[in-house]
Amino acid sequence: MRKIIALLPVLLIIIVSGCTSQDPAQILKDSITKLNNLNSYQIDFDYYLSMSPIVEMEGEVTTYSKGDNIRVDMDMPFMMGMKIIIKTYYLPDGTFTCTEFMENVTCIRGGEGMPLLQQESSIEAMERLIEKEVIELEFLGMGNVADRNCYNISSDLDLSKLHRLTEEELGLFGINESMIGESESIKSFDIEGCYDSATGIQLHNKMIITVDMSNVTSAYMFGLDEIVMEIGVTATSYKPNEAIADSVFELPVEVTDIPNMEFF
């Protein structure tokens, strides 16, 4: 009995920390299973995009998911405090992108959105990369995002092994064959995510890519030895199994063959 009592503080530390011996690959596999059990959800993100030292952008993203329907709304800054709202609909009969600016709304067929916001495909892509030994994972302990516990996992991508992936697998991760040809100029490609412990969804995701620009003449003229590209989202609110109306996935206007570009 005394031995058990003596072990209690250690056991409590393990429980509170979320058991630091978690296998990151298994966490990803479990996350896919948990996501498949989600009937619906609404999740709000703060996002930022940067290409230091050239471009910086930040805004908000909301994702709605119900059955086979997904909608991703993204606010993009335009000028003088104005925003362009891009809504991408992933529906059984196709993908549609609707753009709202001031009172002008247009919808066209097509568009990909941000790969890291497509929860299922993003996690599936990570699993494929693990199988092909293209990526090395590390479990960093438990985190808390949007008042929810999540598993922090960092990833180190070995670009020299990208050729092991099929074209389909590359597409899942937002990579194409042209990027493989240019991979020699990429110094590093780091990924970080925090996966909700209860439902598997990504509450935080960040990609940081460092590109060597020393051999690019135009960049050299401006004194740029490298460019650091960073894309990240962090959830501010998450509602699993939310009651989402079917009307959320209805396009606001008829689809046009040629988008109206007047606001440019």
Image: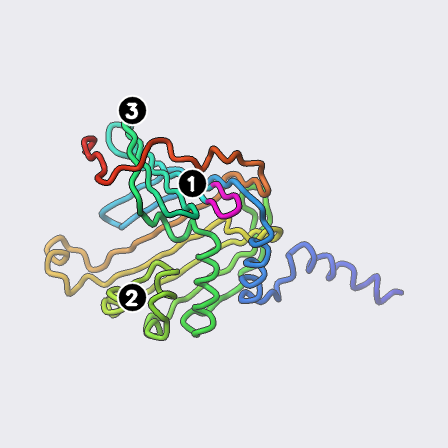
**Residue at 47% from the left image edge and 52% from the top image edge:** 119
Point out the tag, 1 or 2, that comes first from the N-terminus: 1
Name which residue type carries label 1: Asp
Name which residue type carries label 2: Lys
Which residue in the protein does label 2 denote? 187
Is 6 left, or right, of 17 in this rendering? right
- Report the Cα–Cα distance between label 3 and label 2: 44 Å
Which residue in the protein does label 3 denote? 103
Which residue in the protein does label 1 denote? 46
Identify which residue, 264 or 155, lies in the foreground: 264
Is 218 left, or right, of 150 in this rendering? left
**Residue at 60% from the left image edge and 65% from the top image edge:** 22
Name which residue type carries label 3: Glu
Q: Secondary structure at mark 3?
A: loop
Q: Secondary structure at mark 1?
A: strand
Is 205 left, or right, of 176 in this rendering? right
**Residue at 27% from the left image edge and 50% from the top image edge:** 51
Q: Is residue 129 magenta?
A: no
- Crowd tier of the residue under label 3, counting other residues whose Cα lies within 10 Å: few below 14, some 14–19, many 20 or above: few
Residue at the limit of the structure toward the top, as seen here: 103
- Crowd tier of the residue under label 2, counting other residues whose Cα lies within 10 Å: few below 14, some 14–19, many 20 or above: some
- Pinpoint residue 21: horizontal percent, then vertical percent: 62, 66
Identify which residue, 242 or 258, lies in the foreground: 258
- Report the Cα–Cα distance between label 1 and label 3: 24 Å
Dominant SS type (magenta): strand
Q: Are marks 3 and 2 in contact (CB under 8 Å)?
A: no
